[in-house]
Amino acid sequence: MRIFILSLFLLLSGCFYSLIGLDMSVEGRHKMWLEDMLKNIGQKNMYDCTYWICGYRKIDYIFLGDSKLSNGNLEAGYNHSLDRRGTKFCRYFFEYVPATGLIVGFRFEEPEPFACRITGA
């Protein structure tokens, strides 16, 4: 029983992440978020509603709208809040080709360093 409780405690603690090689520091979670977002470029389609980006377009407090860029592409903006009070906002933007929906670019704005990150311990 003691081993089970100790294992459970370890699993629920930040030490577990260290043991499996995940950096759950603020900087590490920012890096994971950034890598995940960059994977969308050239791979995902804004109009594919089986994908989360399309679904987020339907949520008013997340989707900021589309802006037309000087090169003719569109840029879709999104809010990403990390805390329950909504005080640490990160905004991210996907540039896409209007005719095909293919994502061709990504950028983000954060009010403080590492505000854009995945949640975690």
Image (cartoon, rainbow, N blue to C red):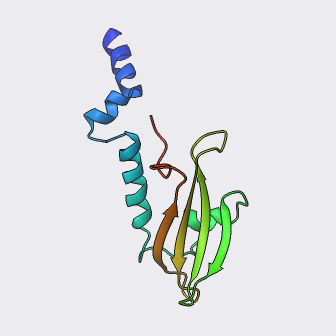
Q: Please identify the residue farthest to the top as the structure is shown.
A: 2
Q: Tell which of 69 and 40 is nearer to you.
A: 69
8 over 99 or under it: above or below? above
Report the quarter where the C terminus lies.
top left
Q: Position of residue 5 (x, y in %)?
A: 38, 14
Q: Position of residue 26 (x, y in %)?
A: 41, 42
**Quarter of the image with the N terminus in it:** top left
23 in relation to 36, above or below: above
Q: Residue 85: image x %, image y %?
A: 67, 39
Residue furthest front in the image: 112
| Residue drawn at 41 percent across, 26 percent down | 12
Q: Residue placed at 37% from the left, 39% from the top? A: 25
Side (left or right) of 33 relative to 72 = left
> Looking at the picture, how far across and down is residue 67, in whole percent?
64, 78
Q: Closer to the camera, 48 or 109?
A: 109
Residue at position x 64%, y 39% from top? 84
Residue 99 drawn above or below residue 74: below
Q: Residue at x 63, y 62 (%)?
A: 56
User: Horizontal placement of 20 versus 34: left or right?
Assistant: left
Number of marks in the rendered image: 0
Q: Quadrant of residue 23?
A: top left
